[in-house]
Amino acid sequence: LPRLSIPSSLLALLMQSGFVNPNPRPPSISRADALFEQRPDFEFSFEIPKKGIADIGTAEVKLPPVLENSELVVVRYDLPFGLSAEPDSTMGQIVVTKDGKPDGEKVGDILRQTTYWRGKNPGLFDVSKNADNFDLVVQALVTNDLSIADEIVLVFERPL
C-alpha cells in the first residue's frame, strides 16, 4: 500500500483537534449492545387512522427494541385523548407516568412511536430517536387533531 506522508505540524494539529487518535483502539461492544444485536426487531402493522371518510391504508413497521426483555403494545385512542408521559433522563426515553385505558399504556412503558400529520399526509414519528427534544415529541403528538383524523395510534415498548 502507498504510504501517505503528513507533515508533523499538520499531524500534531489533527491530533490536538481530535481528528486523529494517537492511540487507536478497536471499538468496544458492551454486553447490552451485543444482546440487542442478537434480538430481532419488532415487526407489526396497523391501520393508519382515517382522514374523514378516506381510508389511508396499513403501516408496516419494523422497530428495533430498546430494552433487553420487552413487548410492543399498539394503542388506538379516539381524539381528543390524554397521555401522561415525560422524559426519563436515566433511560433517555419518554416514559409513561400514569396508566391509560385498561388495554392501553401502563406506568413504565416507553413511548416509541406515534402517528403524526404533515398537512394532509400521515406519518409515523419516531419518539425514541427524538426523546432528547420533548417539545418536538409534543408537537408531533398534537398534529393528531380532529380537523384531520378521528384517532391516534401510539406504540409503546413494555418491559417484561
Image (cartoon, grey):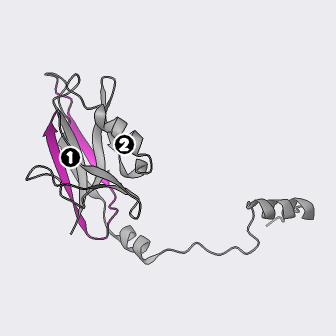
Q: In which quarter of the image is the N terminus?
A: bottom right
Q: Where is residue 111 in the image (x, y as percent from the top left)?
A: 28, 52
- The residue labelled by disc 2 is 137
Which amino acid, mark 1? Ser
Q: Which of 160 and 54 is in front in this view?
A: 160
Dividing the picture into quadrants, the one containing residue 87 is bottom left
Q: How many circles with numbers are drawn on the protein?
A: 2
- Looking at the image, is 90 positioned above or below residue 74? below
- Looking at the image, is 26 positioned above or below residue 150? below
SS at circle 2:
helix
Q: Does residue 80 appear to the left or right of 31 in the view shown?
A: left
Q: Position of residue 157 (x, y in %)?
A: 25, 58
Q: Where is residue 38 in the image (x, y as percent from the top left)?
A: 35, 71
Is mark 1 in CB contact (under 8 Å) with mark 2? no
Q: Quadrant of the C terminus?
A: bottom left
- The residue labelled by disc 1 is 45
Residue 4 at least partly seen? no
Q: Which of 3 and 59 is in front in this view?
A: 59
**Residue appearing at x 18%, y 53% in the figure:** 105
Q: Does residue 8 appear to the left or right of 85 in the view shown?
A: right
SS at circle 1:
strand
Q: Does residue 103 appear to the left or right of 108 in the view shown?
A: left
Q: Position of residue 42 (x, y in %)?
A: 27, 58
Q: Pointer 2: residues within 10 angstroms few (<14), some, or many (20+)?
A: many
**Residue appearing at x 44%, y 46% in the figure:** 133
- Looking at the image, is 145 positioned above or below residue 43? above
> Which residue range is magenta in the image?
54-79
Q: How far apart are marks 1 and 2 (CA)?
A: 22 Å
